[in-house]
Image: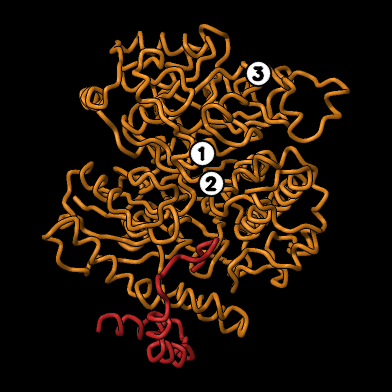
């Protein structure tokens, strides 16, 4: 038996995963344990979990691999300061102490931290370092259902690379081309996230969600910032940006170009301007991704595409690549951000360094991304009793029947089942679910349950067999990383007056038979559900369909704004009591809000820092 | 010591000998950067460092 522990840490979304004989056994993000969103710290708890899950002590693990190379990153840092000098002295003075104190000595730092897991772990000889974008590419290719694929990765920045093209074949993966810092599609999108008043590294989803409310009238202006070539490669004009050496993403020239300062979220509302900005940057991002996809398809002639890196979480762009039919098949790593780097680093070590064979699975090898913690029925009941929760235990049939009944009565339910998902999306393991047919559901969920901005859309979970009857897509999208439109026969046409509405006002118009999951442009971020990956969730939606004729439910992550997705039954109970969720279904236990002791109700909204 | 060997190997592979003066400068004066900072905070809105 051979085991590999993969670690990503110290920037954002720390995570750990474990492979045994090349098979993915467990993976989790540190934020779920510490309850700090995007926690960048050493993933002590995540490592403890993956070791415990695989019944291993750290001293028994054969290899440990970190997801990137610190020396290479330091090289980039120094060269960037030299290239921009004397600009960036303030940033330099802040960054260097951090590096001299610890980041440069990451092997030692890691070794010291790792020792705290096991006193018998005594040598750093088995600590390896992967390359940031190779880790991303490996996380996309090796678990994919393809024997051969072009792998496209794009994110903010790793060591030097910001965008890469790699070719994967059997158990080999080779990076062929790279675009280097400071030219970065991820950082460009983040610059507009910052400019629109959202938090960089988490607000990108919001910007993407805001885009359909606007018109891309700033597209040409954005193209003065970015020079896009026919093959999709690009260069950013650095005179408009400040991220290479400064402490902000954009500068005065950038503000002057668009005519406004960055929005201050504490006292400025989102206006049509920000919606138009969002629509414009989204369009430019899609153009780059589509051009890149087309050029690599033509150059390598390979029919399969794998995607990873933070930009691959832009499901709208992914949906456009699919719609263009550039590739026959597309597979996207569900943990496409840095958390997934831990998995990719481990897989790269196993297949590339150790030359181990790869078994291609006709689905994929991610196990539905249900790679996190799980609790037995006994553990759930014990924990619920200890925290004073009042619950009914039911059998499987009743559980499915009652939950679907609650759903059809338009109740909002916390759904906590099986193993936790790895990656940013809740996929029916730690989800809040609702009835998509309700025209009040989106607003209620946003404002009374999730405590987030009213413009933000919700995603549908749909039975795989029924997806093409409701949406203009007929491929697997198990990880909610594809966007497609609602079919015409399910749409409700807007009146002339309604068409004239601007921005968020459009939200109040019922636009389809499933308004809660229909964005203003009739798009939806789809999760297809099959019986193999999550039978319980499949059965629930099937029962809901039996009762209502609708094979679709609303699925959003089980958390409130700024909170990491719930990890334990206690986290779930706290979120349940702190929000206007009606029922909580954990394992075979059903909790009715009306039957809970009101002393457990609390002001949950202010518990987490807003993202 | 291991650190210095690894750093040497890195510079050799990358052929970045010109970084040596900068690294020496940082070795000599780096402590100033470290000790003149009260606390080390991750100061950046995007963690590119």
Label 3 – label 1 distance at C-alpha = 22 Å
Is A499 displayed left or right of A124 in the figure?
right
Labels in figure, total: 3
Residue picked out by circle 3: A439
**Foreground: disc 3 or disc 2:** 2
Please provide percent x and percent y for residue A517: 62, 26
Q: Earlier in the sequence, mark 1 or mark 2?
A: 1
The answer, for residue A390, to whether it is visible in the render is: yes
Please provide percent x and percent y for residue A76: 51, 76
Q: Quadrant of residue A350?
A: bottom left
Q: Earlier in the sequence, mark 3 or mark 2?
A: 3
Residue picked out by circle 1: A561
The answer, for residue A18, to whether it is visible in the render is: no
Residue picked out by circle 2: A611
Please provide percent x and percent y for residue A544: 50, 12
**Depth check: A133 or A379 in front?**
A379
Disc 1 is attached to a residue of which chain?
A
Provide the letter of the chain coloured orange.
A
Would you say the residues marked 1 and 2 are in contact, meaning their CB atoms lie under 8 Å apart?
Answer: yes
* Mark 3 surroundings: few (<14), some (14-19) or many (≥20) residues within 10 A: many
Which residue: 88% across, 23% down? A496
* Mark 2 surroundings: few (<14), some (14-19) or many (≥20) residues within 10 A: some
Residue at the far top: name it. A547
Q: Secondary structure at mark 2?
A: loop
Please provide percent x and percent y for residue A471: 65, 25
Label 3 – label 2 distance at C-alpha = 27 Å
Would you say the residues marked 3 and 1 are in contact, meaning their CB atoms lie under 8 Å apart?
Answer: no
């Amino acid at each position: 038996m051979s085991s590999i522990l993969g670690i990503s840490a110290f920037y954002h979304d720390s995570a750990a995963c474990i492979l045994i004989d090349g098979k993915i056994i467990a993976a989790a993000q540190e934020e779920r344990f510490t309850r700090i969103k995007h926690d960048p710290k050493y993933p002590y708890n995540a490592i403890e979990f993956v070791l415990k899950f695989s019944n291993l002590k750290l001293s028994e693990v054969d290899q440990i691999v970190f997801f990137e190379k610190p020396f290479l990153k330091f090289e980039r840092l120094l060269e960037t300061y030299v290239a921009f000098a004397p600009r960036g002295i303030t940033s330099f003075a802040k960054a260097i102490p951090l590096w001299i104190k610890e980041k440069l000595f990451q092997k030692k730092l890691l070794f010291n931290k790792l020792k705290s897991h096991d006193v018998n772990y005594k040598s750093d000889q088995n600590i390896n370092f992967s390359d940031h974008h190779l880790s991303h590419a490996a996380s996309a290719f090796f678990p994919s259902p393809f024997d051969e694929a072009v792998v496209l990765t794009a994110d903010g920045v790793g060591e030097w690379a910001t965008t890469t093209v790699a070719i994967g074949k059997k158990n080999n993966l080779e990076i062929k081309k790279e675009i280097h810092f400071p030219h970065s599609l991820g950082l460009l999108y983040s610059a507009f996230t910052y400019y629109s008043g959202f938090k960089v590294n988490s607000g990108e989803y919001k910007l993407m969600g805001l885009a359909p409310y606007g018109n891309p009238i700033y597209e040409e202006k954005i193209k003065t910032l970015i020079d896009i070539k026919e093959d999709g490669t690009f260069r950013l004009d650095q005179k408009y940006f400040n991220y290479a050496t400064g402490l902000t993403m954009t500068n005065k020239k950038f503000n002057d170009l668009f005519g406004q300062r960055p929005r201050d979220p504490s006292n400025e509302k989102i206006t049509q301007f920000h919606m138009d900005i969002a629509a414009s940057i989204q369009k430019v991002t899609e153009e780059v991704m589509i051009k890149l996809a087309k050029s690599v398809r033509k150059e390598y002639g390979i029919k399969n595409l794998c995607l990873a890196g933070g930009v691959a979480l832009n499901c709208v762009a992914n949906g456009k690549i699919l719609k263009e039919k550039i590739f026959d098949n597309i597979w996207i790593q569900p943990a496409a951000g840095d958390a997934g780097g831990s998995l990719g680093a481990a897989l790269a070590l196993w297949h590339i360094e150790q030359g181990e064979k790869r078994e291609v699975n006709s689905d994929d090898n991610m196990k539905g991304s249900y790679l996190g913690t799980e609790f037995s029925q006994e553990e759930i009941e014990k924990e619920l009793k200890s925290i004073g929760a009042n619950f009914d235990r039911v059998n499987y049939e009743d559980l499915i029947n009652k939950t679907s009944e609650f759903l059809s009565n338009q109740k909002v339910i916390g759904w906590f089942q099986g193993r936790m998902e790895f990656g940013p999306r809740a996929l029916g393991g730690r989800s809040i679910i609702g009835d998509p047919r309700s025209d009040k559901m989106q607003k209620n969920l946003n404002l009374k349950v999730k405590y987030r901005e009213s413009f933000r859309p919700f995603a549908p979970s749909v039975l795989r067999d029924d997806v093409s009857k409701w949406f203009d897509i007929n491929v697997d999208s198990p990880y909610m990383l594809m966007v497609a439109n609602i079919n015409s026969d399910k749409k409700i046409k807007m009146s002339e007056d309604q068409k004239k509405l601007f921005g968020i006002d459009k939200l109040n118009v019922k636009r389809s038979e499933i308004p809660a999951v229909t964005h203003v442009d009739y798009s939806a971020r789809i999760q297809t559900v099959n019986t193999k990956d999550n039978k319980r969730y499949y059965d629930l939606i099937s029962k809901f369909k039996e009762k209502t004729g609708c094979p679709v439910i609303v699925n959003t992550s089980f958390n409130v704004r700024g909170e990491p997705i719930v990890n334990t039954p206690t986290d779930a109970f706290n979120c349940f009591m702190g929000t206007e969720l009606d029922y909580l279904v954990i394992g075979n236990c059903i909790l009715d809000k009306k039957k809970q002791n009101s002393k457990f109700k609390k002001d949950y909204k202010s518990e987490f820092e807003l993202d | 010591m291991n650190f210095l060997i690894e750093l040497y190997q890195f510079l050799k592979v990358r052929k970045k000998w010109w970084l040596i003066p900068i690294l020496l400068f940082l070795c000599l004066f780096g402590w100033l950067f470290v000790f003149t900072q009260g606390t080390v905070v991750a100061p950046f809105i995007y963690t590119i460092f």
